[in-house]
Each structure stands twice: as structure tokens, then as C-alpha cells.
Image (cartoon, coloured by chain):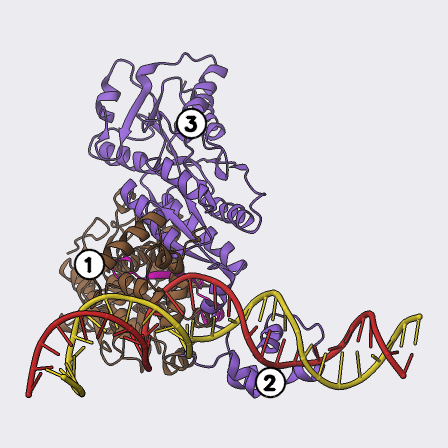
Chain colours: A brown, B purple, C yellow, D red
DNA sequence: TCAAACAACTAAACCGATTTAGTTAATACT
DNA sequence: AGTATTAACTAAATCGGTTTAGTTGTTTGA
């Protein structure tokens, strides 16, 4: 490949490596116009491109960051990655993507791999299963920015959606349509603040509209086992809800497939508002109304924060909140 | 960050750098058990991790490949990237993603950036606008593997779907349902073999079933301007088709949105089979039948091919075809 | 007029590994 | 007994840059 190196340029321009290097790095102090011109010509003639590896070795950095996500294939995730990537390229950085498929062990291995690669920093949507490990890396001096998931005790270098407001808005949206029995479908939210925040948003919307909280309407869903109680059984219970509010795209689609197999229809029989936007929603049998996050912006901001951290350790240890917005489609019915 | 280096290990183990290096690289020839043990202990004690930058500088490689795609956010593309990434990680490589957003200039810049970064190789779904440039890089010694798009004259290091067979199968699927007037909606396929192949598949299915080719049923679509003739006008023409066969996900969805605004319904009024799979298809008003590619496999195979090329320039200059399959859903009606 | 300041460079050390070419001491061979 | 071989190491060169500490010749200042 490119074999021409700095010495070659220096030789051709009849200067020393040092001078050539100075030129390349734009430090023209005390360098004659003539010398500059000769070096410029030599570079052009030889089609010289500095070797970033050698450069990085000396500078002790990689101009590379790591991004740990669950699955790049996810709709929101892919947009977050775009945000990260676009911002990175803007600043001369590159991003290395690591997929964990929701496995904390893979997450730990990714962290270690990125550490060994000496990336300049890491953006992670962590599973919560590696909090100590992550702290260790931070203590070793690795800049790390979290997004999406907030775990108790971590208030720094964090960027997330305003989950509480989002859940509040979604719930209120349903309430305004006349719904009082709103089933909140969630993953376990102990220790996961960003899930708990949604719960708080839901609760406070109910409160503000003087609707009593019915614990039977809090329903749980797990990634591996699905619904704790099937949606059908929920709808047949005596506290049957008139609407579902699902806290994650995977929950929304799981609910959708289950209802698809029954005669129950949306929004005639139940309304549904989801968290996270849905690809191709316009073509759905019933386009689903959602509170959507801004994954692209989150990616961009996370990267911005991380690069601030990298370039100035003192700075950038904030917690940033991005607003969500209800996107009205056709899955919520007005009721009396 | 990690400041401990090989000398530190060597010192602690009371050996020379050379010996320590040998140990790390698993060359234990002529090294006493005792020495090995001391080095192992020192590494553990100091928590030493070799600096890959220094290593790569010496080895003149990066253990990194570049991937140039249009948009990582696309459904198929994101899966291809997963395939690339998964295979890369398997072999100790990392992948750097560059998005071009269908812009040949961005593509050219990405190529240059990756070249300057000295990636070990590049996987590209090229726009076709940079063929000479790509040849230049190949001649400079950069291993490059193409996927998705095949341009005339490039038969090497190529991996793509069996477009011709796929289009044949899709067309035949419609014919078997009784369709004779099948509208083939395509992008301009001059000079783009992988598009022309679809056309040939379509034509040969018609031929094989003794259906005359009606040029009016070949319709064009452009990425910026959309349909040359609107689907509605096509359906109102005297040669009105009973089915559409769209050659790309973007065409499929464009068609879908246009029909959505009319009373025309699928499959009652027209049938539709698309190229490329569709996310969340099961929730569609009418789940669309498609011939789907295998983007994940393509990513994996492309990477395999590229790594073969990297490690053995002589090998791996093949053209690989991956089969597609018709996924039957509900957008095609049986007609008399 | 002579030292201080400065312009315009360069030699050599350095970044953190790998690798080549030795070195030394013990063993094997004739 | 003297050379050849081998085991077990090490010093130094190398990868391709950047940076520090000089060097040399010309101006400037008192």
C-alpha cells in the first residue's frame, strides 16, 4: 500500500524529517516560504499521506471511540449510531460498534476489548449488569458516556430522554381521550431509573387528573418470557383497561402480535400508545400512536459530551435530557 | 489510562523486552518454564495489556476494515453490518462504518478516508459513480470486496444475491397465481448489472410461461423524483397490470404510500410483490409478499472473502451468489 | 562592537511494541 | 580435548511519525 513516508518527503524537499513534520502539522513558524513550497510540492509529487498509526502511537490516542449497544439492527439504535457516526466524522473520530444482544457478559467483553484497543472513550447503553466494571474503567481514566439506561447512583455523563415527561404526556394524552383505566406495561423497573421515571410520569399524570392508581393495571413484561399475564387475560380481568401504554418497542410489537391472533381490535376494543417510534408505521393495519424518542439527536449529543470529556477531563460531566414527543396516529380511540 | 508497558513487565520479571515479547506472542521455544512463569506473573500483577497501536505500527496493518454503505439505518443494510461485524469480531478485526447517503462524492471521500486510515481492506456497496477511483485503490493494493451492486466489468471479489433467479421466482410466483400483466418497477438498469439481472429474470419467467413481454409494463422509478408515471396512471392505462413487482424496498414503500391515498386496495385491485424484506411486515394492513435477500449472510460472506484477500492476495477473487427466497404473505391475489 | 535575540533549520530521543542478529553457557560429538 | 550444537536469553534496529533540545547564521540593541 502507501509506502511513501515522511523521510521520503523530507529527502525530496531537501529538508529534515523534523521540518517536514512541522509543515504537515501546520506549524510554519520560522519556516521560509521557499521551504514550505518545496515540502508542499514533494508531498504532492509523492502522494504522501501521513500514517495515523505512527501518529497515534506518539500521541497516545486512537481518534476512535467505542459504542456499545444491544443491537445495531434495532430501529432506534441504528439511528443513534448514525448520530454518533455523523458527529464523529465531523471531528475526525471513528466509531467502533459493539453489539451485546442484551447479554451482560458480552457487554463486559466488549468493554474489555475496547479498553485493550485503547479507544479514546466509550458510549454505552448499558444493561445494568456491569456497573462496578464500568466504574473501574472510569477510574482507570476511560471517558464513558451513558445513554438510554440510567442506573441508580450514576448521574454523570449521562444522556437520556426525558422519560418522566414522556410518560406523563402519553398518559395524559390517553386521559384527554377519556381513558381512565390505562394499563402500564413495563419491564422490571427496580434499580433502573429510566424505567422508574416512566412509571413516575404515568403515576403523576393519573394523580394530576384525579384518577386513582390501580396496581392491577401495572403489568410486567420480560425480554425472555414475554408478558407475565397475557394481554388477553388482562383484558378479561374485572379491572380490564381501555388502553395499553407499552414502555418499549419490543413490548409494543409483542402485544400487537398477540392481539393479532384474536378478534380484539385496536382501537375499537382497546387503545394503545407505545414508547419508541415504529418503522413503516404508516402502512400498519392500525398505525400506532407513540411517544417517540430522538435517537439521532441522542447519538449526536452523547458523542459531543464524550468528546468534551476526552479533550477536557474536567468538563462535560453533566446529565442531559432530550424531550420526547407524542406522535399521534390511529391506535387511540376517544371514549366517553 | 493503561500506562504499564512491555518494559515494565520485562523489568518485573527480570528478563529483556525481547523475551517478554516472545512470551506474549506465544513463542516459547527455548524459554525456560521458570522464565515463562515469571513473565506470566508479572503480566498478571501489572495488569498488562499490549498496545495494539505499537503492534500495528510494527506489523503495518490495522486489524480494521472499512465498510461503505448507503445508510446504516436501512433494514437490510443494518443486518449486513451485523453480519460483517459478527464475522470481524470472530477474527479479531474491527469494522469502521461509513455512510454515503447515496452520494458518490461522499463515497469517494469515504474511500479516501479509509485509505488514509490504512484499513486492511474495504467492503463496499458502491454507487457505481466511482468505478475508476475504486480500481485505483485496488491497484494501490487495497483489498476491496463489493456487494449488492454489480457494475459492468467487475467480476471479482463480488458477493451478491442471485438477482436473476430471485426475479424469476417472484415473477413465476405471480404467474402461477394467474397474473399475466405484471408491471416491473425498476430503477434505471443500464450499466448496473445487478438491476439488469432482475430484468432478465423477469423476462425469462414470462418467456418460459409464454407470456409476451409488454414494454409498457416496464416502469421506472428514480430515487429523487419517484415514479416516472404515477402508479395510479399506470393502473388506468389500457395495459393496466394486475400486479406490481417492485425492485427495491424504497420503491415498494413509495408505491404503498401512493396507493394508501387512493381507494385502490391490495390485493383486491392489484397484487404486489416486492424485492427486499420489510420490517414489521406482519403488522401491515396487508402484509407484503416479497423476495427477500439474506443481508446477514451477505455481510458474513463478504467479510470472509475480504479477510481471505487480506491474508492471501492470491486467493479469494471469486464471485459469490446467495440465493433469495419468496416469502409469501398476503399481497398477491389468485386470479382466474 | 559585542552580546542578545531571532529566524530557519536539524539531530536525536521517543512512542511501545516486534524482530534480527548476536551472546553466553551448557551439552553433544568426534 | 576441542569444536559444533543447542538452549536460553539480550542488545539494538525497526516501524513512521512527533518533539525536544540544539545548531548555525543573521539581525537587532546598547
Horizontal and vertical percent position of residue A207: 17, 74
Mark 2 lies on residue? B41
As drawn, the label of residue A42 is: none
Residue depicted at 43% across the width and 48% down the height: B122
Instruction: Name the foreground residue: B182 vs C15.
Output: C15
Q: Nearer the viewer, mark 1 or mark 2?
A: 1
Quarter of the picture holding the N terminus of chain B: bottom left
- Quick check: A16 above or below C4? above
Point out residue A229 in the picture as x, y percentages from the top left corner. Answer: 40, 64
> What residue does disc 3 label?
B198
The residues colored magenta run A89-110
Whether residue A196 is visible here, answered yes or no, is: no
Q: Quadrant of residue C20?
A: bottom right
Q: Earlier in the sequence, mark 2 or mark 3?
A: 2
How much space separates mark 1 and mark 3, taking CA atoms?
59 Å
Q: Measured along the vertical axis of the image, is residue B75 above or below residue A272?
A: above
Chain of the residue under the numbered disc 1 shown in the image: A
Residue B146 at x, y percent in the picture? 44, 41
Check disc 2: other Cα within 10 Å, few if <14, some if 14-19, many if 20+: some
The question of residue B150 being in magenta is answered with no
Identify the secondary structure beneath mark 2. helix
The label on residue A33 is 1
Amino acid at each position: 500500500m502507501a509506502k511513501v513516508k515522511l523521510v521520503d518527503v523530507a529527502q525530496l524537499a531537501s529538508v529534515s524529517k523534523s521540518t517536514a513534520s512541522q509543515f504537515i502539522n501546520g506549524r510554519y513558524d520560522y519556516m521560509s516560504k521557499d521551504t514550505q513550497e518545496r515540502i508542499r510540492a514533494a508531498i504532492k509529487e509523492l502522494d504522501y499521506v501521513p500514517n495515523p498509526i505512527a501518529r497515534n502511537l506518539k500521541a497516545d490516542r486512537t481518534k476512535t471511540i467505542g459504542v456499545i449497544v444491544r443491537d445495531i439492527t434495532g430501529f432506534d439504535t441504528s439511528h443513534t449510531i448514525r448520530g454518533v457516526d455523523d458527529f464523529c466524522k465531523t471531528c475526525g473520530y471513528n466509531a467502533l460498534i459493539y453489539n451485546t444482544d442484551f447479554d451482560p457478559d458480552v457487554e463486559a467483553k466488549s468493554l474489555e476489548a475496547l479498553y485493550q484497543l485503547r479507544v479514546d472513550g466509550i458510549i454505552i447503553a448499558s444493561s445494568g449488569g456491569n456497573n462496578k466494571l464500568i466504574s473501574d474503567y472510569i477510574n482507570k481514566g476511560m471517558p464513558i458516556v451513558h445513554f438510554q439506561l440510567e442506573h441508580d447512583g450514576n448521574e454523570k455523563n449521562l444522556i437520556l430522554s426525558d422519560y418522566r415527561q414522556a410518560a406523563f404526556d402519553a398518559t395524559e394524552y390517553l386521559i384527554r381521550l377519556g381513558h381512565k383505566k390505562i394499563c402500564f406495561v413495563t419491564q422490571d423497573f427496580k434499580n433502573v431509573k429510566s424505567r422508574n421515571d416512566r412509571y413516575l410520569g404515568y403515576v403523576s399524570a393519573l394523580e394530576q387528573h384525579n384518577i386513582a392508581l390501580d396496581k392491577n393495571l401495572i403489568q410486567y413484561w420480560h425480554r425472555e418470557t414475554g408478558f407475565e399475564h397475557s394481554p388477553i387475560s388482562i383484558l378479561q380481568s374485572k379491572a380490564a383497561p381501555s388502553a395499553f401504554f407499552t414502555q418499549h418497542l419490543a413490548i409494543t410489537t409483542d402485544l400487537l402480535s398477540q392481539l393479532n391472533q384474536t378478534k380484539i381490535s385496536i382501537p375499537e376494543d382497546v387503545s394503545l400508545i407505545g414508547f419508541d417510534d415504529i418503522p413503516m408505521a404508516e402502512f400498519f393495519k392500525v398505525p400506532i400512536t407513540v411517544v417517540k424518542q430522538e435517537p439521532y439527536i441522542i447519538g449526536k449529543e452523547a458523542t459531543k459530551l464524550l468528546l468534551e470529556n476526552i479533550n477536557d477531563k474536567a468538563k462535560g460531566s453533566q446529565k442531559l435530557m432530550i424531550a420526547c414527543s407524542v406522535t399521534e396516529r390511529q391506535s387511540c380511540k376517544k371514549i366517553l
